[in-house]
Image: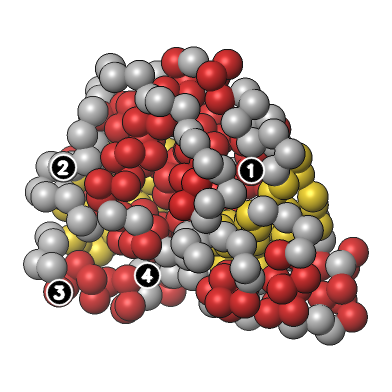
Amino acid sequence: MRSLIDILDLSTEELRELIETAEDIIADPEKYAEVCRHKKLATLFFEPSTRTRLSFEAAMYELGGNVLSVSSANSSSAAKGESVADTAKTVSCYADIIAMRHPKEGAAFVAAANASIPVINAGDGGHLHPTQTLADLLTIWREKGRFTDLTIGLCGDLKFGRTVHSLISAMSRYEGNRFVLISPEELKVPSYVKSVLKEKNIPYEQTSDLMEVIGDLDILYMTRVQRERFFNEEDYLRLKDSYILTPDKMRSAREDLSVMHPLPRVNEISVAIDDDPRACYFKQVKNGKYMRMALILKLLYEAGTLKTLPERSRA
Ligand code: NCD
């Protein structure tokens, strides 16, 4: 059974196809409006979420399907001590596909190993978040028209920020990209993520100074300091405002910079930047829904749950 746990589960060819499907949905949503009739998506969210859960649910509704939802660990049998494996087996009896968010790294993998329907990782602890990366990729594609030869700055909590880990993996597969990793010492990218850059000889630099590098960037991916993953509140309070992007700082950035953020924003981007044409974070939200629609279609088709897919119009 095909699931999506890590963005690397999808080949670059498949990513291109998902983007084509998303673009086709944007161009002609009517064509897709009934494709998932009588099919059910279960969203199992054992950790807070606004965007990701609603994005999956909106995606399924826009495909004409239905949604079953668990929106907190407290309201489900997880609170009674049920294992992820048993939850996955149970939900497989009700739904056609699962989107799962869980505070433990590896939870979606365990769910996929036990479910008899496709499982989509909607964030597993501080590990990975492949569908945010799908949103990010469509945004980069629409803003830049390419995935190659980009200088990509990632700024903030690069240690616990799962969206950062998945985006680095994804962009490491394309030629000519360079990464600028901007974080306080304590929140640097984990070594398992950096080892991919080293193995593939991908150029990257690490710095704690955003202003020193902002003028070089094609993309600036800001992130929230992940309070819930800190062991003590004092460290969080010390680091939470390490970077705040302001209109003044944006004056040193390029005219064609794309400012991205997976959201939620706490304090990292001044709201005064929202009207700057370089701000792309609300576009990412929209793009996320279309990419999740494309992904649901692909996984349901590969599982044999959908017998046909609409023909994509050739651009
Ligand atoms: C991110 C997440 O949950 O990892 N949010 C999201 O899904 N858009 C980023 C975050 O919580 O900071």
Q: 106 or 196: nearer the eye?
A: 106
Number of the front mark, 3 or 4: 3
Q: Which disc number belongs to residue 199?
A: 3
| Amino acid type for the residue under numbered disc 2 | Thr
- C-alpha gap between disc 2 and disc 3: 18 Å
Residue tagged 1: 56
- Dot 4 alpha-carbon crowd within 10 angstroms: few under 14, some 14 to 19, many 20 or more: many
Q: How many marks?
A: 4
Image: 4 above or below 153: below
| Amino acid type for the residue under numbered disc 1 | Phe
Kindly identify the residue that appears in the image at 29 percent across and 19 percent down.
Answer: 314
Number of the front mark, 2 or 4: 2
Q: Do the residues labelled 2 and 3 touch (CB within 8 Å)?
A: no
Which badge, 4 or 1, is on the more N-terminal residue? 1
- Dot 2 alpha-carbon crowd within 10 angstroms: few under 14, some 14 to 19, many 20 or more: some
Label 4 CB less than 8 angstroms from ligand 1: no
| Amino acid type for the residue under numbered disc 3 | Glu
Is residue 226 among the parts visible in the rendering?
Answer: no
- C-alpha gap between disc 2 and disc 4: 24 Å
Kindly identify the residue that appears in the image at 25 percent across and 64 percent down.
Answer: 206
Q: 245 or 88: nearer the eye?
A: 88
- C-alpha gap between disc 1 and disc 2: 28 Å
| Amino acid type for the residue under numbered disc 4 | Lys
Which badge, 3 or 1, is on the more N-terminal residue? 1
Residue tagged 2: 148
Please identify the quarter of the rendering in which residue 289 is found. top right
Residue tagged 4: 188
Which badge, 2 or 4, is on the more N-terminal residue? 2
